[in-house]
Amino acid sequence: MKIKKLTVKDFEEAFGENLSPFLCKKIESCNLAYQELTSPERDNLIMNIMRTLSDEQIQKSGAHRANDWVRGWAENSSELSETNNFNSLIPKYFGKFPYVRWKQNFIKPVNKSFEYNMARILQYWLFEKHFKDSNSVYEFGCGTGHNLFRVNEINKDANVYGLDWAESSQDNIKKINNIFDKNFGSHRFDFFNVEHDYTLDPKSGVYTFAALEQVGSSHTEFLT
């Protein structure tokens, strides 16, 4: 199957606008090569998805999985202590599956970093649009803290805070500050027991990325 590659033009069509020179360079620096699926491969993938969704034994999101995330971020934290390398911060769920969605279809990345690079590009685009002039930016459900670097890259003057229910996340951010000479703030914030008196700095930006879905149907209290 012929190898194709996502380009700046593809993202401009997807986002519906011309992209900044900064974001164009980021896209061009990524390995976004992929293959289209054959019809049998696509059909088989869809059948596997349907079987998974109908499996009553599949683990559901919710408070009962809190310890899974504590262990997961602790694993990244331990690896970071050994390597002092940013790549140790990347959550293990990126690149877990051989297929990704693109424009209402499935494609097969050539490189395992494809999915993470897609997330990076989406974040850079969002952060440029919304956080360039923020005095402070907060990520709720920050996990290892890897996303905070991109906020800092877009807005070097902003105070950047990472909040997560797992204490291993706060430990990780302390290591980030020591290893990478950052000054990220951290705070334990439990989506299931919302801290209603937690206050934000004036002129702040707030986001959550690949986190709120873990709360399942208990997201209402946080959003209100």
Image (cartoon, helix red, strand yellow):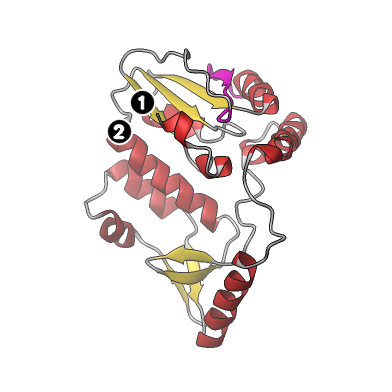
Helix, strand or loop for the magenta stretch, by majority: loop
Residue that numbered label 1 is attached to: 205
Residue that numbered label 2 is attached to: 130
Q: Classify 123 as above or below 157.
A: below
User: x, y (%) of residue 106?
Assistant: 48, 71
Whether residue 69 is visible? no
User: x, y (%) of residue 151?
Assistant: 43, 30
Query: Which amino acid is tagged 1?
Result: Gly
Using residue 224 as the reference point, say whether residue 140 is left or right of it: right
Using residue 171 as the reference point, say whether residue 183 is left or right of it: left
At mark 2, the secondary structure is helix
**On the image, which quarter does residue 84 sit in?**
top right
Tag 1: Cα neighbours inside 10 Å, few (<14), some, or many (≥20)?
many
Specify start and end residues of the magenta stretch as a single range: 180-192
At mark 1, the secondary structure is strand
User: x, y (%) of residue 169?
Assistant: 65, 27
**On the image, which quarter does residue 214 sit in?**
top right
User: x, y (%) of residue 47?
Assistant: 59, 77
Q: Is residue 10 magenta?
A: no
Q: Is residue 190 magenta?
A: yes
**Mark earlier in primary sequence (2, 1):** 2
Contact? badges 2 and 1 (CB < 8 Å): yes
Rounded to the nearest angstrom, the CA distance separating label 2 from label 1 is 7 Å
Query: Which amino acid is tagged 2?
Result: His
Along the viewing direction, whichever of 5 and 91 lies nearer the viewer: 91
The numbered dot on residue 8 is none
